[in-house]
Image: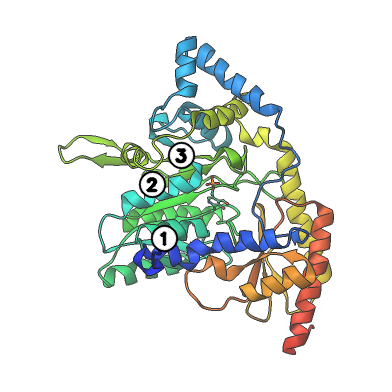
Amino acid sequence: MSRPVEIDVAALHPAVDDPALNSMNFLNEVAQRYPDAVSLAAGRPYEEYFDADALPRYLDRFRRYLTDDLGYDEAGVRRTLFQYGRTKGILHELVARNLAVDEGVTVDPEAVVVTVGCQEAMFLVLRALRADPRDVLLAVAPTYVGLTGAARLLDFPVRPVRGGPDGIDLADLRAQLARARAAGERPRACYLMPDFANPSGVSIGLADRRRLLDLAEAEDLLLIEDNPYGLFPADGTTRLPTLKALDEWGRVVYLGSFAKTVLPGARVGYVLADQRVRGADGTVGLLADQLAKIKSMVTVNTSPIAQAVVGGRLLAHGCSLARANERERAVYAGNVRHLAAGLARRFPPPSPVRWNVPSGGFFAVVTVPFPVDDALLARSAQEFGVLWTPMAHFYDDTAAVDALRLSVSAVTREQIDLGLDRLAALLADEMDRRGVSVT
Ligand SMILES: Cc1ncc(COP(=O)(O)O)c(C=O)c1O
């Protein structure tokens, strides 16, 4: 038998060997190796309310929308659900209605491209913006690893902007813009999550949102707003307007995901790109149409069956995902508050262990008096039975980071208690080994 072909990884695109692309696999592998560990690592949605019986109901609801609202005949319905379809998707009208109902934003449905998860939306936007070797992307750090990985695949350098306790350090954004431009680079956009960010859990206040938009306008910068967690405030009610809702000039490209509000298995998200693009022939169209051209060469179109399931759930709740997720919102809000209270009980002052109390979302960050790496995670899983995510995975360099991310979206309060007990034991053990005083 001949030997199979062997390819040196160095002969492949460098991204395949990049830490950003290894990150998710590594974390999944640890989780699979220790299935009995309590996972405060996964940013997955709560599973208890997944209902397989609802899927045919949603499909049927969307079918009725096609016939009753859009006037399709049976052949049209079959074609829409079974065939290759519109590149920009078949959910655009419902996405527009959802944004009107839940976010108070009026958008042109033609500016919506329905994508295979928000991940594809990121990829399309970055592909379109990365036009020249001088182009760089700014991203608030710590940054969602899916963004960094997509940028790597596109040879799009990412320049970190300090996030800090206010969600974005505007002085640092200004400084990074100036530094990049002085170095001959072209900052094309800044990626950020203004609401309950992954991984920091931090939100940007209203005044800073306005300042950020003013800065973007003054600096001729696009903002890429990613908003998978905005519906989940910890007090159940307080939500700030999205950047897109405050955007007077069309500075914001808005990314949406149905992973946390409908089901991640559908793999449906979208990008709202209402910026105008002037063609070489002088005609003006939407950025969304340029993104659709790229999409046609990446995934052709988003599965219409998956879109129909998402559409059915939207229709079943008057296009409000806030209403559709009342039970989930209560779980997440309760869990985030339970986590904060549990941390306060286990690490009372003057403990060197610190954490932020997020105002919503799935995540909180715990800061400890030693570097947190993958080896410590492996020891935590094996010896203490608890999983979490080293914050180093969310920074685009190799510097040590003294912090870890906890996620409470896919666990019960009992599991949070057990996980925190185990985490406290790990941290006490590690501080003891290192001779760090516990108080
Ligand atoms: C900030 C952020 N953006 C995007 C995504 C990916 O969303 P999707 O599953 O729709 O691709 C996630 C998933 O965890 C996320 O946390």
At numbered mark 2, what does the secondary structure look like: helix, strand or loop? helix
* Circle 3 SS class: strand
* Residue most extreme to the front: 1
**Residue topped by disc 1:** 2
Q: Is residue 48 left or right of residue 229?
A: right
Are discs 2 and 3 less than 8 Å apart at CB? yes
Q: Judge the density around disc 2: few (<14), some (14-19), many (≥20) Cα neighbours within 10 Å.
A: many
Residue at mark 3: 115
Q: Nearer the viewer, mark 3 or mark 1?
A: 1
**Quick check: is the Cβ at mark 3 less than 8 Å away from ligand 1?**
no
Single out the mark in the foreground, 2 or 1.
1
Q: Answer whether residue 350 is visible to the viewer in this image.
A: no
Residue at position x 83%, y 60% in the image: 417
Crowd band around label 1 with a 10 angstrom C-alpha radius: few (<14), some (14–19), many (20+): few
Q: Which residue is mark 2?
A: 124
- Which residue is at the front of the view, 58 or 8? 8
Across and down, in percent, residue 424 comes to 79, 72
Query: How far across and how far down the image is residue 242, in percent?
Result: 52, 46
Q: Is residue 278 above or below residue 371?
A: above
Residue 291 screen position, x and y as percent: 35, 41
Name above or below for residue 348 compared with residue 101: below
